[in-house]
Image (cartoon, helix red, strand yellow):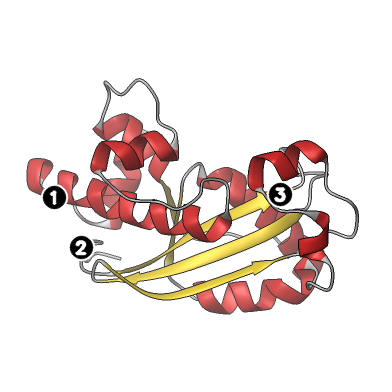
Amino acid sequence: MKDLLLEGTFVSIDVETTGFNEEDAQIIEIATVRVEGGIITERFSTLVNPGHFLPERITRLTGITNAMLVGKPNIYQVMPQVLKFIGDSLIVGHNVKKDLAFIDRVYRDMYNKRFKHPHICTLSLAKRVLPNMKSYSLKDLADYFGIGYKRVHRALDDAETTAYLFIELLKLLWNHMGIGNYLEIKKLSKA
């Protein structure tokens, strides 16, 4: 991963869940978007049946209803497809540690080991690159960069928006600081 990320490949990921605690909430939607050379080349998205009714607040937040989840696969059926899609690509997400915590729990159930993968958080990176923003929500950052979006709190739309946000952050870093590879950007996002 010595190469410029702006010219390379990464996968943007987002999950929607039944709650916010990764130890007891379930994934209800997962999406991944592959970006190659700054262009989205592939998408994967699916609703996931959590095995129980959704809390009303989650339906209000996401627009996902219980009826939409009837007949959908469970997360254990979906995870092999997600892992194949990710492959050895860098994972990018907005507050990505939360998304990865949900994936890790399922991964541990399935493979009896932790899910460890190179990743960068656009939330942390944006806070470092744009220190004077009032809000670092995905919506506010998309508005700042003029990135169009359809719906917030839907996995595919959020994964796509995050991919475009990461591209904009990469452009800023390269043009203003000469920073462009994974290790430099990972270090900056943690600083």
Q: Which mark is residue 174?
A: 1
Q: If you read the primary sequence from the N terminus, does the residue marked by circle 1 or circle 3 appear first?
A: 3
Residue 133: mark in rendering? none
Kind of residue at disc 2:
Leu
Quadrant of the rendering where the C terminus is positioned = top left
Label 1, label 2: how far apart the Cα atoms are: 9 Å
- Label of residue 17 in the image: 3
Q: Residues within 10 Å of mark 2 (few under 14, many from 20)?
A: some
Q: Position of residue 20 (x, y in %)?
A: 71, 38
Numbered tag placed on residue 4 in the rendering: 2
**Sequence-earlier tag: 1 or 2:** 2
Q: CB under 8 Å between callouts 2 and 3?
A: no
Three-letter code for the amino acid on which mark 3 is drawn = Thr
Note whether 151 is above or below 90 in the view shown: above
Labelled pair 1, 2 in contact (Cβ < 8 Å): yes
Q: Position of residue 56 (x, y in %)?
A: 81, 39
- Element assignment for label 1: helix
**Where's residue 166, x and y in %?**
32, 51
At label 1, which amino acid type do we have? Trp
